[in-house]
């Protein structure tokens, strides 16, 4: 089964509205004839600006997180209802920065994921191990736990709106990249876990992205791996001249 490639840009906490508009316009122009699935995920304050520019094109509008409750007395949080109102189509959940800097655990991420799916969003569920976990030989165990707990209570039908992003935490923003073989091994393992939970057909269909210092120079080698179906791009997503070559990579 051939899965579509899915290239997503996570802009993290960068850009003013003017800067975001400039980048969004450059991406729309540069990717209008792109063959893959694309996503741009700016900060909450930029969603309306960027959404207006992306509207009707081939780049989905993504949010970087959401609150675990629909609405209520949650100062500083942003709800799925507010994101839907802005035209957001995809929500990134469980990013390593949310897990490790903001101490989000598997149960909280699972609660957010089910809420997002309930409201019709697509979700990118991020999983991945720390350097010390990899060095202790626990990379597979960590990814299995995060995948299994993250998908708890998610139906087979809902799973069709879930993408998994494997991001080895030691390779994010460090310039280190998992070798294509390292990344492929974990991607294959995650696919096996999905197969155990949902059956082989679901495992074959699910898109698993790689995230962690993806650059124009290494994108094609990573995507050439059998189980790597795209990329969740951080730093290189902040400039059109680095994101567009990744997004339009030629399979090797």
Image (cartoon, helix red, strand yellow):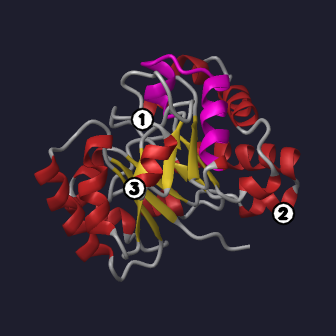
Label whose residue precedes the other's in the sequence (2 or 1): 1
Q: Which quadrant of the structure image shows residue 244?
A: bottom left
State the residue position of label 3: 218
Q: Residue at x 88, y 54 (%)?
A: 199
Q: Considering only vertical position in the picture, is 114 above or below 227? A: above
Q: Is residue 232 visible?
A: no
Q: Considering only vertical position in the picture, is 141 above or below 92? A: above
Residue 107: say if magenta.
yes
Q: Is residue 178 left or right of residue 138?
A: left
Q: Which mark is residue 78?
A: 1
Secondary structure category for the residue under label 1: loop
In space, the residues marked 3 and 2 are separated at their CA atoms by 29 Å
- Residues in magenta, as a range: 95-117
Q: Which mark is residue 201?
A: 2
Q: Considering only vertical position in the picture, is 54 above or below 218? A: below
Which percent across, then down, holds residue 160?
Answer: 71, 59
Secondary structure category for the residue under label 2: helix
Residue at the limit of the structure toward the bottom, as seen here: 33
Residue at the limit of the structure toward the left, as seen here: 18
Observer-side mark, 3 or 2, equals 2
Label whose residue precedes the other's in the sequence (3 or 1): 1
Circles 3, 1 touching at the beta carbon (< 8 Å): no
Which percent across, then down, holds residue 114?
Answer: 67, 40
Q: Is residue 97 visible?
A: yes
Q: Nearer the viewer, residue 58 or 34?
A: 58
Main secondary structure of the magenta stretch: helix
Q: Residue at x 20, y 68 (%)?
A: 26
What number of labels is visible? 3
């Amino acid at each position: 089964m051939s899965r579509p490639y899915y290239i997503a840009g996570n802009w993290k906490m960068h850009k003013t509205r003017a800067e975001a508009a400039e980048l969004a316009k450059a991406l729309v122009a540069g990717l209008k004839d792109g063959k893959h699935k694309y996503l741009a995920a700016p900060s909450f304050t930029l969603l309306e600006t960027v959404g207006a520019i992306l509207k009707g094109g081939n780049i989905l509008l993504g949010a970087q997180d959401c609150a675990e409750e629909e609405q209520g007395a949650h100062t500083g949080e942003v709800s799925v209802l507010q994101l839907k109102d802005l035209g957001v189509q995809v929500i990134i959940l469980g990013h390593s920065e949310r897990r490790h800097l903001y101490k989000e655990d598997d149960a909280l991420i699972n609660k957010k994921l089910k809420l997002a799916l309930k409201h019709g969003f697509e979700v990118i569920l991020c999983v991945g191990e720390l350097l010390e976990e990899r060095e202790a030989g626990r990379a597979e165990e960590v990814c299995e736990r995060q995948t299994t707990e993250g998908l708890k209570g998610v139906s087979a039908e809902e799973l069709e709106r879930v993408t998994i992003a494997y991001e080895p935490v030691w390779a994010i923003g460090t310039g280190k990249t998992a070798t294509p073989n390292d990344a492929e091994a974990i991607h294959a393992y995650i696919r096996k876990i999905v197969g155990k939970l949902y059956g082989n057909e679901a495992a074959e269909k699910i898109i698993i992205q790689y995230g962690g210092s993806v650059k124009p120079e290494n994108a094609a080698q990573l995507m050439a791996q059998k189980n790597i179906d795209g990329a969740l791009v951080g730093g290189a997503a902040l400039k059109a001249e680095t994101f567009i070559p990744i997004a339009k990579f030629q399979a090797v």
